Amino acid sequence: MADEPIEMERLPDPHGHPPADDTSPPSHYELMALAMKELLTEQGTLTNDEIRAQLEKIDSWKPAKGAAMVARAWTDPKFRARLLDDAGEAVKEFGIDPGEVKLVCVENTDEVQNVIVCTLCSCYPRAVLGLPPDWYKSKAYRSRVVIEPREVLAEFGTEIPEDMTLRVHDSLATLRYLVLPRRPAGTEGWSEEQLAEIVTRDTMVGVANPKVPGDG
Ligand code: FE
């Protein structure tokens, strides 16, 4: 008996948005990555499944671990000191493996707001925060935040007073930054879990600051 033919229903506009643009030619780095992958699998160093599994693992990384770490730093001065002294070592206490990358944690204070960027591409503390948001990779952010950081932060809704120092940190493939935000007033006596909830991805990039809900 012949197999039943598979019928696919085609609706006139099933998606309601323009098609994804994956038709542009691969970039230099995409070609390099593909060539590297072919070489490694051909010589038996890695299997396609191992590469896929590692990509799946990276995709699963979320900013939640970073938030838990910030909450710990806010409540445990010794951990805060370890984080600022050697972030790469301190994150291991949260089961994060920073790999070969040097991780530096910069602290926001009453006088200094730190913000991170990769002017060249999209270097980002992925082990701690997961994959970078699209705006972090955009040319507009990468080029403008180093020239007019106050304006860029204002566009994120973050007003930095003129008398406050705004420090922009340019990441590298081998050096990634993480911002330790300032603990907001009104959080005295909060548990680490409560504190972690107000520490978002953007506050650890430095384009926003943690807020107490209902505090505007
Ligand atoms: Fe980069």
Image: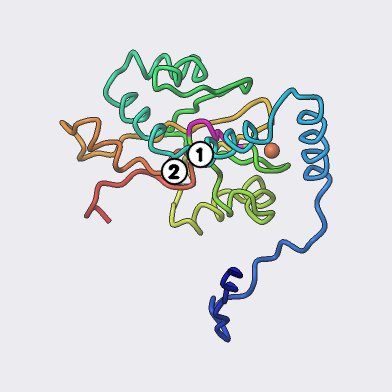
The answer to whether 109 appears left or right of 137 in the picture is left
- Contact (Cβ within 8 Å) of mark 2 with mark 1: yes
Circle 2 residue: 201
Residue in the image at 44% along x and 57% along y: 157
Q: Does the magenta portion include 127?
A: yes
Q: Quadrant of residue 62?
A: top left
Closest to the camera, between mark 2 and mark 1, is 1
Measured as percent of width and height from the top left, residue 44 is found at: 76, 24
Query: Image quadrant of ligand 1?
Result: top right
Is residue 38 shown left or right of residue 21? Answer: right
89 in relation to 62, above or below: above
Q: Which residues are magenta?
A: 124-128
The disc labelled 2 sits on which kind of residue? Arg
Foreground residue, 55 or 182?
A: 55
* Residue for badge 1: 130
Q: Amino acid at mark 1?
A: Gly
Mark 2 neighbour class, 10 Å CA radius: few under 14, some 14 to 19, many 20 or more: many
Is 199 displayed left or right of 32 in the figure? left
Residue 52: percent from the left, percent from the top? Answer: 62, 38
Counting residues from the start of the chain, the first of labels 2 and 1 encountered is 1
Within-10-Å neighbours for mark 1: few <14, some 14–19, many 20+: many
Which corner quadrant holds the N terminus? bottom right
Residue 177 relative to residue 143: left or right:
left
Q: How is the image coloured?
A: rainbow
Label 2 vs label 1: CA separation? 9 Å
At x 58% / y 54%, what residue is drawn?
135
Residue 169, how many percent across, how many down?
60, 34
In the rendered image, residue 42, in percent from the top left (x then y), is placed at 81, 30
Does 93 appear above or below 133? above
Secondary structure category for the residue under label 2: helix
Q: Residue furthest bottom?
A: 12
